[in-house]
Amino acid sequence: MTGGTKFRPKDQWEINKNTHEALITEDEAEAILNMVGNQTTRARKSINRVYLLSGLLESPEGSKWHSDGDGSYRLGKGKRVNADAIEQAIMEKVITSLSANDMVDAILNHFHEIAKQRESKDTSKKFRSAIKEIDTKIEKLTGLLTETTAPEALLRTIEKLEIERKAVAEKLKIVEEESQSTAIYKNLTRGHVRTMLKTVIENLEYTENKESLKDALNALVDNVVLDPASLTASVTYRVGPQSGDKMASPRGFEPRSPP
């Protein structure tokens, strides 16, 4: 740690006994060293712990619950809840919700709506017409090069048109790539969505990388509202049923009093 005292492991020490009068007994020294070692271990675990619900967990009034660095989430300077307990409860709730029929239907409708909106705003025809018009202008100007005594001006105009054509062509490419995903969204079925969600659930259940798990939760969940009084929680998803189903306080969810 920067600016602090560093402790080497005991097995690396060189110990010379009886060099001066002992200020404390060996048993007292051993107790102090064990205490320091335990504190160092706890600090290291706190630093390395990934809080899955950081940024997602809030009170009904919109205040954020923050990780306190000691294995809990804390609301302001008040109530604390055990991080492991609430994270496990929320994960179980999310996994259960992803298997539900209303979630499948909501996701399917979401993608179908995206496809419908994209089709109504399809600009590919406009971009193709613009490219065709630019090509016609370039062709005419190129034909005039052999008839003019000052080709520089025509070449500059042709160069500008080429730059414009490239920009329009890039926009058309983006639209055409989007059109491919639009076709996929439009043809999605409940079976497709269930298969997709099954893969998501398996990743949530079996991944050991907490950072990846946190990223997955942030992609799925908009927020988790935890009431500090009743300790009931509701989960609102980015895509899916937006009623925010409430769940009861799970075992181990009990608050911890502030120190």
Image: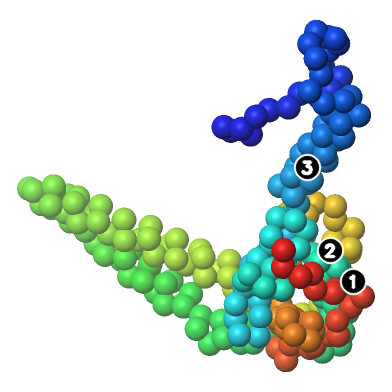
- Quadrant of residue 129 in the image? bottom left
Image coordinates for residue 102, horizontal then vertical, percent: 82, 89
The residue under the point 25% across, 52% down is 159
Q: How far is the residue under mark 1 from the one under mark 2?
A: 9 Å
Question: SS class of the residue under badge 3?
Answer: helix
The residue under the point 24% across, 62% down is 140
* Viewer-nearest of discs 2 and 3: 3
The residue under label 1 is which amino acid type? Gly
- Can residue 111 be seen at all in this image of the molecule? no
Q: Which residue is mark 1?
A: 252
Quarter of the picture containing the N terminus is top right
Left or right: 157, with 73 as reference point: left
Q: How far is the residue under mark 2 from the one under mark 3?
A: 20 Å
The residue under label 3 is which amino acid type? Gln
Q: Which residue is mark 2?
A: 84
- Quadrant of residue 177 in the image? bottom right
Label for residue 39?
Answer: 3
Image coordinates for residue 9, horizontal then vertical, percent: 81, 24
Left or right: 4, with 69 as reference point: left
- Toward the viewer: 50 or 253? 253
The reply to whether callout 1 and callout 2 are in contact (CB within 8 Å) is: yes
* Vertical comparison of 7 with 131: above or below: above
Q: Which of the two discs, 2 and 3, labels the residue nearer the N terminus? A: 3
Q: Badge 1: few (under 14), some or many (20 or more) residues near its Cα, within 10 Å?
A: some
Q: How far is the residue under mark 3 from the one under mark 1?
A: 24 Å
Q: Which of the two discs, 3 and 1, labels the residue nearer the N terminus? A: 3
- Quadrant of residue 144 in the image? bottom left
